[in-house]
Image (tube, helix red, strand yellow):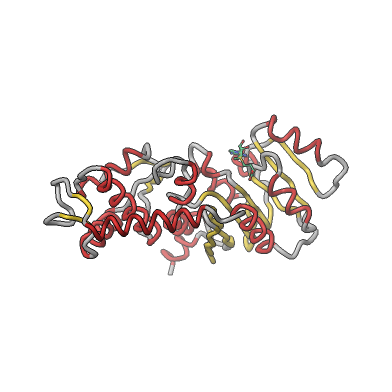
Amino acid sequence: MKEFPVADRTITHQPSPELRDFLVFYLLEQASKAPFPPSDLGLRVARDSGGDLRPAADDIRAAQLLCWERGWLEGSRPDSDLPVSLSREGRAEIARRTEAERRKSAHPHPREEAAKHLVSLLSPPDEQVVLDVGTGDGFLAKKLAAAGFRVLGIDTDASAVRPARSACLGDSALQFEVADVRDLAERGRRWSKIATSYCLHECADPVAILEAICACLNPGGTLACMDFAPNCAAYLSRAGSTPFHPFRALAEGDWRYLAPDFGLTRLQFFYFGYVALVSAEKVNRNLRETKLAA
Ligand SMILES: C[S@@+](CC[C@H](N)C(=O)[O-])C[C@H]1O[C@@H](n2cnc3c(N)ncnc32)[C@H](O)[C@@H]1O
């Protein structure tokens, strides 16, 4: 499988039930449009997503096998090089999944629900300032402030921060700065609570940004991050595109893979329709070092 270097690490999406399900959906969808060779699954997904989704070999194999075992494909082998079509059961399955996605995407306010849960994860508010990375128009910063937190919203984009700042003039709980989280990390700035909303998927190198965010987190501190659920067919079917995630949102497997390097522990994942929320705590030492030393 082709590997894509990200900073000094090479990330291949780690096996996860979420990615497997996505690959099954993709395989069925492709076969429903025209006969499709199942052996093409991984490469086709990586190519069509512009390299943003690099499924692991285990996930590809599991998706091929599942479609085969359930009798959803007409063909002689689950990983056949020969184009195969959907069986009658396969057509019924894709209709069922499409309807389930339609119902999910009709979910009223996934982003609002995720933000509410994020605020509860950081509660109770105290004297410490919460850093909101990639604050933009202050969507999350304002919700945190309304719940009683003191917040510093930072963003590299001055034009995003300006209206947020003027709308909150006089609110001493809310401050905004034009800053890059990587510079803050380099300057040794630290917080015990960091939140971020819809930022990582936009970054050319989300892993480097997450690394900088984690560097800004005090040992024992809490990180809460909400973003598009990666490869989320619900979001994309509503947006009218094929179920490829056009963004760089990190999947559960990515978080678990990166956590030891970034000193994160106690990872928790929550899903609200097309929004994923991750919370984690910072450990005192690099987990990988701790493991090696043990
Ligand atoms: C889609 S906006 C999200 C705004 C807001 N948090 C929300 O939930 O609606 C993402 C923001 O992240 C900012 N951003 C990207 N890279 C950043 C970095 N390295 N440091 C700080 N902000 C960054 C972008 O400028 C952009 O305003």
Instruction: Please report the residue visible at 21 percent of the width from the left and 62 percent of the height from the top.
Output: 71
Instruction: Please report the residue visible at 47 percent of the width from the left and 59 percent of the height from the top.
Output: 260
Quadrant of the image occupied by residue 120: bottom right
Quarter occupied by the C terminus: bottom left
Task: From this view, report whether residue 156 is shown above or below residue 142.
Answer: above
275 or 138, nearer to the observer: 275
Instruction: Please report the residue visible at 71 percent of the width from the left and 53 percent of the height from the top.
Output: 130
Q: Position of residue 79 (x, y in %)?
A: 18, 53
Task: From this view, report whether residue 294 is shown above or below residue 72.
Answer: below
Q: Position of residue 44 (x, y in %)?
A: 28, 42
Q: Position of residue 160 (x, y in %)?
A: 68, 34
Count of numbered tags: 0
109 or 79, nearer to the observer: 109
Instruction: Please report the residue visible at 67 percent of the width from the left and 43 percent of the height from the top.
Output: 135
View extreme (bottom): residue = 294
Q: Position of residue 83 (x, y in %)?
A: 16, 45
View extreme (right): residue = 170
**Ligand 1 shown in quarter:** top right
Task: From this view, report whether residue 180 is shown above or below residue 74.
Answer: above
Quadrant of the image occupied by residue 15: bottom left
63 or 200, nearer to the observer: 63
